[in-house]
Image (spheres, helix red, strand yellow):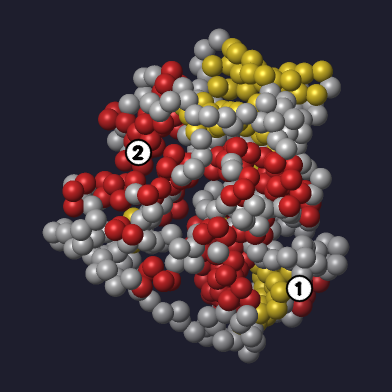
Amino acid sequence: MNCIHPTPDEPDFGVAEMLYIDPSTCVDCGACVSACPVGAIVPGHRLADAAERFVDVNAAHYGIPPEDAVRFPVEKSKRLPLAPISKPRAIRGGPEVVDVAIVGSGPSAMYAADELLKQPRVRVTVFERLSQPFGLSRFGVAPDHTATRTVMNLFDEIARHPNIEIRLGTEVGRDVTLDELRSRYTAVLWAGGAPTDKPLAVPGIELAGVQSATSLVGWYNGHPDFLDAGPDLSTERVVVVGNGNVALDVARILTGDVDELAKTDISRDALAALRSSSVREVVVAGRRGPEHAAFTLPELIGLADGHARVWVDPADLAGTNADDIDDPTVAAKVSVLREISERPRPAEPFIRLTFGRTPAEIVGVGRVEGVRFVHTGTDRSETMDAGVVLTSIGYRGVPVPGLPFDDATGTVANVAGRVVDGDVPVPGVYVTGWIKRGPSGFIGTNKTDSGETVANLLADVEARTSVLS
């Protein structure tokens, strides 16, 4: 019914933090509820207590009075559906069988495979380095976000298609070369993601006890590359530099109820370490003000209204008012932060969200003892004691041997998914996901991104511009 906005065809889809259901066009058929792979769509009158705030957030997006927020239908607005509905067109021309190799098996790879397999002439072979598939949806989502992790059920369904093969434990560059793939397949689609962290360039970053938040996520999710990445949790304070969703994830896990975590598929080694943890406070420090916080509104609401113990010092919100902010999503974030700041300081262990602090130095002798911050835009500084420092300032792609790399963006050079060397297309080679666009968006963002790449790949097959085996 085109009632969920923004749609992939609307200009703000790529930057939206959440999707909104428009009651002026929704007929309450319930189809989206059963179709959503992560169970993120719930009727307003059935929301859990911890999610009730989303009723008002959704209503505010469409300018609906709060008292009408859960009543369907409401008075019809003049807004019309914006997204066209179309069926995939069968490809014309090209080889009788279109063989496509996909490197990687994360969300962007599986969404691309799903699009490709809508064409009966396409055969897909996925090459995955690890012994388990699905990338960040398996190893990057926090174990207590069980609904989000169920997207793997969708990927399992895709993997059962008769025209796809997933080769686990197969690393391109070690077991097979890119040139060999290009010679064997109609097209090669690289979906290797952005596997490294942006470095934090401050003195002391090399001290023991400093590590990336990504390594901690891999550790508690049992990623084989990070089995030995467990931090020393004998400290009372952990500082996380950066305040995106990953920063909130690690803070929540480090302060969470261990008995509740035991009900998830968290690594048993990590669970044992958390049971004996001495951590009493996790400080999540952002460089800019609260109105520029990198975490999303849904993630903040989940933190504020769930079981997490979280606090904001009212002084960190001084001069920032939701009423002065035009963007409704940003205004909602500030409102939630203001509400958190008015609560009593919670029992330990708890999360403290702090803003306007730029890391200047990791201090310590041999091992981290604290972080010296400069109050952003001033010459004032403060040092926070900490026994563990986690950096969480973003991901970065790494060069792929044999493909042109844009060092400024950390991506393989491409135009709409077509790999290019300067202005010259590299025949038969494509990219999707973070290695294509940079580390932005969420799991679902990859569906639109992969759709664009696949559309161009198939158009090239039709035009016989791909390298054929």
Please say if 376 is above or below 112: above
At x 39%, y 19%, the residue is: 318
Q: Is residue 131 left or right of residue 30?
A: right
Please state which amino acid type lies under the numbered disc 1. Arg
Is residue 236 visible to the viewer in this orientation of the structure?
Answer: yes
Please say if 174 is above or below 67: below
Q: Nearer the viewer, residue 137 or 302?
A: 302
The residue indicated by pointer 1 is: 167
Q: Quadrant of residue 83?
A: bottom left
Toward the front, the furthest residue is: 259
Q: Nearer the viewer, residue 101 or 70?
A: 70
Q: In the rendered view of the protein, which quadrant contains the N terminus? A: bottom left
Q: Could you say whether the residue bearing mark 2 is in a helix, strand or loop?
A: helix
Give the mark toward the camera: 1 or 2.
2
Residue 49: x and y in percent read 37, 49
Please say if 339 is above or below 429: above
Q: Nearer the viewer, residue 253 or 381?
A: 253
Residue 398: x and y in percent read 72, 49
Please state which amino acid type lies under the numbered disc 2. Ala
The residue indicated by pointer 2 is: 332
Which label sits on residue 105?
none
Residue 334: x and y in percent read 38, 32
Q: Is residue 169 left or right of residue 255?
A: right
